[in-house]
Structure formats: structure tokens, C-alpha cells
Image (cartoon, rainbow, N blue to C red):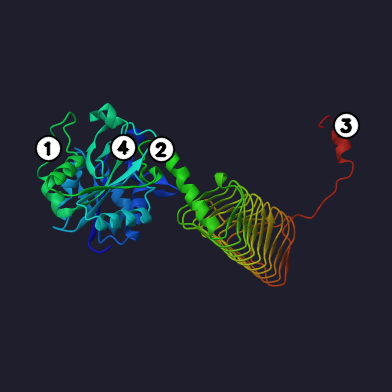
């Protein structure tokens, strides 16, 4: 919105979180709280975003980097003091949207409506308010008989009549910048806490004949996170929003209550997500897939028509019509091409598995290039580590690797080659060859009975 500046207060200690990290960097659905707020502000087109930092400021800056400007509040002396620290970064006129960094559930739609209401009503200050069943601890919005806002009364200062009011101050506002700057010079810290309250600035602006209004929204959106319990409650609400959005876009989520999907995940239509799945980071899943039950997928790309069951996929790319699991582990930097089968108890690490290949079960493939239409037998292993360095295995197209085969890297297996079961391969295998690397079988007849006679069995 043209000319709008946003100020986000994020300097608090967050003592109730009982954490060595600042409160606002704790994550909700995989994204730091402060980032949810900044995203909502950027969606409405705020001209500039200023974040007031203090406690562990470097951690907040690590999250937001160069997306915003920063003001520093070395000692936390109240919300009014926090705004004072950013005063020099504010323009001389226009409107400023003041938010808190611990309210990740605020939405861009609500912010748009708040600002439009502020402009339409020609307010000097518009308070974002909500109606709570139990308003204990919150400042109350006091209105006159015509519904105009008269003042904000803090809970500890409210009379019994005022405490019966259920409309509360969220501590988020839109304010006329010129009037706010004048008011900041007039507020004092003559109170029990010795702090400068932004609510005092609201009353000063009213005394300047500024018009004060309040825009009421559902309590869910203004809920602040001050403890681990409240973090969990915010996570539940956000998870429900995300899951419902995917379902509205054509994804079937069988049990949303047991399905965790991160904020940046994309899922195509007609994909089914079964119970117990955790899908995180910048994961992108195509259409017509079946994911789960009980899968974890992080920062990975999965094509159309794939099936993933009881498996973990990390930072990897999976093409179309791939079947994975149950109980497979796809580790980072793996690429699995179309029409591949990765079976139960298989681990793939930093490897390329080309089209049509099968790694059915009980197999480890690490630091390898596996060609097209390869069959990796049960218990086969690429031996990639010599105790100091990792080495590469290259397997050509149409290769058959028998059960319990060790391919000791670095080694190359030519196209159309066969590796006999139980072999340990330490040298390259030519195209079309059969490689056998095992001792000839010897049967010693009567050996068992002889051992028994000697008392050795």
C-alpha cells in the first residue's frame, strides 16, 4: 500500500520461553515467528519494513537478513521506548503499521482490512482489537455510547466495570506518523514499571484532537506467543490453515490432525497424504502421488505418480512414477529417475539411479551412478569408504548385480554385465562380462561326525 511503513517490535527477552534464543526466532510450522509477520506485511505492499531488535539481535538478523531495516533497543523500557528507537527511520508523514514479532497468526487480509478501515475512517490511530471470552491481563478498549474509542485502560488500572469489557487491545496499531512523533516526545515513564507505554501515545494523540478507532478481528489472529505452550497452540492453528489450503487445492489429507506440512511445501492435485507424515522445507510433490503413512520428506522434489511408504527422503530429487519403501532412507544429493523401484530397508546416499532400475531390498548405494534397467540384488553394497575418503561406483545400463555383492569403489561395471551372487568386486568389469569373485565350494564329508567324536561339537 502506497506510503505505508511498517514497524515490527521484536526486541523482547521472551523469558517465559525459557530459551537461549530470542522468542521471535522460534518456529511455527518450520518458519520463524518473525518471518510470518514480515511475509504478511510484504504481501500488502508495505513501502518499508523496520524491525526493532534488542536481545540476541544477531539471531533475528540472521533470519531476516537484508529484507528489512533495523533499529536497536539496547535496554527494553516498554513499547513506547521501542518505537522511540526507530523514530529516525520513520518518514515525517504518512501512516505506520505497528506490529509485534510474536504474532505469527496475523494475516495479510486482516492487515489490508485494518489499513483500509483506518484510511476510510480518517483515523489518527486505529487499534487492532479483539473480543475475548476471558480478557484478564489485557488492556480494555473503552468506547462511548456512539461506539467511538475513548481510551485504552490497562487491566491493572481498570475499574470493576471496565474489567467487564471483553474487547481488548492487541498492541498492534496503524498511526499517523506526524502525530505519533509529537506524542513520543510527550510520553513519560512515571509508572510502577518505569517504562514508556505506547498506549500513552494513543491518549496523547486523542488529546491533540486526533480521531481514535478500533478494528475488531477474531482473537486467533492477534494471539501472541510467550511460552512453549502458546507456541504449540499457534502451531496447531497454523498447521490447520496449511492443511486446509492444500485440501482446497485438490490434495487429499486423510487425517489432518496427524499430518505436518511446512509453510513452503507445494503439493499437486489428486495426491493423497496418509496419516503420520511430516513434509518440511521447500519440498515440492507432484500430482497423483501417494505419500505415507509415516513418511518424512524434507527439502525434496517428487514428481507425478510416485508412491512413498514409511520412508525418509532428505534434500533429494525424485522423478515420475517412482516407488519408494517401505522403510527406505533417501539421503541428501540423491537423484532418482523415472520408473525406479526403491524397496524396503534400502539406503541411497548421494547417488543417481537411472530410469527403470530396481533396488528392491536390504541394499546400500552410496556415491554411485547406477545406469538404466539395473537390478541390485538383495544385500548388495557399494563399498564407498576406505577409512579416509569416499570413492565412486559407476554401474552401466542393464547390469544385474547378484545378492550379497560388495562393489568396492572406485570401480566401474560395464553395460550388460552380470555380477555373481556373493562376489566382492575390486576391479572393473568389462561390458557383457560375468564377474565371479568368490572361493570355489568345498564339501568335507563326515566332518561333523568326526568333530563330535573328538568332543569339539
Observer-side mark, 4 or 2, equals 2
Q: Residue at left 34%, top 43%?
A: 130
Which residue corresponds to mark 2? 230
Q: Position of residue 272 (x, y in %)?
A: 61, 56
The residue that mark 3 highlights is 453
Position of 179 compared to 341: left or right?
left
Q: How many marks?
A: 4
Mark 2 surroundings within 10 Å by alpha-carbon count, few (fewer than 14), some (14 through 19), many (20 or more): some
Mark closest to the chain's N terminus, 4 or 2: 4
* First in sequence: mark 1 vs mark 4: 4
Residue that mark 1 sits on: 188
Which badge, 1 or 3, comes first in the chain's sequence? Answer: 1
Of tags 2 and 1, the one toward the viewer is 1
Between disc 1 and disc 3, the foreground one is 1
CB within 8 Å, label 1 to label 3: no
Mark toward the viewer: 2 or 3: 2
Q: Tell me the CA gap for discs 4 and 2.
A: 12 Å
| 288, 55: nearer the viewer | 288
* Mark 2 → mark 1, Cα distance in angstroms: 32 Å
Q: Earlier in the sequence, mark 3 or mark 4?
A: 4
Look at the image and tell me in which quarter the C terminus lies.
top right
Amino acid at each position: 500500500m502506497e506510503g505505508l511503513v511498517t514497524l515490527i517490535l521484536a526486541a523482547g527477552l521472551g523469558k517465559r520461553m525459557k530459551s537461549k534464543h530470542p522468542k521471535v526466532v522460534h518456529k511455527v510450522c518450520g518458519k520463524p515467528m518473525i518471518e510470518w509477520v514480515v511475509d504478511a506485511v510484504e504481501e500488502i505492499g508495505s513501502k518499508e519494513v523496520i524491525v526493532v531488535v534488542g536481545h540476541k539481535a544477531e539471531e533475528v538478523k540472521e533470519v531476516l537478513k537484508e529484507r528489512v531495516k533495523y533499529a536497536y533497543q539496547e535496554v527494553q523500557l516498554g513499547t513506547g521506548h521501542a518505537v522511540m528507537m526507530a523514530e529516525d527511520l520513520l518518514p515525517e508523514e504518512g501512516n505506520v503499521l505497528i506490529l509485534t514479532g510474536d504474532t505469527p497468526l496475523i494475516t495479510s487480509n486482516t492487515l489490508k482490512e485494518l489499513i483500509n478501515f483506518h484510511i476510510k475512517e480518517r483515523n489518527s490511530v486505529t487499534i487492532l482489537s479483539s473480543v475475548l471470552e476471558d480478557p484478564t491481563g489485557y488492556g480494555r478498549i473503552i468506547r462511548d455510547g456512539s461506539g467511538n474509542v475513548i481510551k485504552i485502560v490497562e487491566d491493572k488500572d481498570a475499574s470493576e466495570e471496565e474489567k467487564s469489557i471483553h474487547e481488548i487491545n492487541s498492541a498492534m496499531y496503524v498511526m499517523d506518523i506526524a502525530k505519533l512523533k509529537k506524542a513520543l516526545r510527550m510520553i513519560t515513564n512515571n509508572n510502577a514499571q518505569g517504562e514508556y507505554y505506547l498506549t500513552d501515545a494513543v491518549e496523547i494523540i486523542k488529546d491533540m484532537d486526533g480521531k481514535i478507532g478500533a478494528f475488531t478481528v477474531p482473537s486467533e489472529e492477534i494471539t501472541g506467543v510467550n511460552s512453549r505452550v502458546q507456541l504449540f497452540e499457534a502451531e496447531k492453528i497454523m498447521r490447520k490453515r496449511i492443511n486446509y489450503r492444500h485440501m482446497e487445492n485438490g490434495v487429499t489429507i486423510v487425517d489432518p490432525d496427524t499430518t505436518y506440512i511446512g509453510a513452503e511445501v507445494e503439493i499437486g492435485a489428486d495426491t493423497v497424504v496418509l496419516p503420520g507424515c511430516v513434509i518440511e522445507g521447500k519440498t515440492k510433490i507432484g500430482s497423483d502421488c501417494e505419500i505415507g503413512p509415516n513418511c518424512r520428506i524434507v527439502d525434496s522434489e517428487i514428481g507425478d505418480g510416485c508412491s512413498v511408504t514409511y520412508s525418509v527422503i532428505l534434500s533429494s530429487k525424485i522423478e515420475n512414477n517412482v516407488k519408494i519403501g517401505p522403510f527406505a532412507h533417501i539421503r541428501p544429493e540423491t537423484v532418482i529417475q523415472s520408473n525406479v523401484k526403491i524397496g524396503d530397508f534400502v539406503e541411497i546416499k548421494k547417488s543417481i539411479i537411472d530410469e527403470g532400475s530396481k533396488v528392491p531390498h536390504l541394499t546400500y548405494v552410496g556415491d554411485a551412478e547406477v545406469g538404466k534397467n539395473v537390478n541390485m540384488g538383495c544385500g548388495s553394497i557399494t563399498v564407498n569408504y576406505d577409512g579416509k575418503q569416499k570413492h565412486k561406483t559407476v554401474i552401466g545400463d542393464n547390469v544385474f548385480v547378484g545378492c550379497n555383492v560388495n562393489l568396492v569403489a572406485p570401480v566401474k561395471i560395464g553395460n550388460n554385465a552380470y555380477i555373481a551372487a556373493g562376489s566382492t568386486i575390486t576391479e572393473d568389469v568389462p561390458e557383457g562380462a560375468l564377474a565371479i569373485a568368490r572361493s570355489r565350494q568345498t564339501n568335507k564329508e563326515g566332518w561333523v561326525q568326526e568333530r563330535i567324536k573328538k568332543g569339539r561339537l
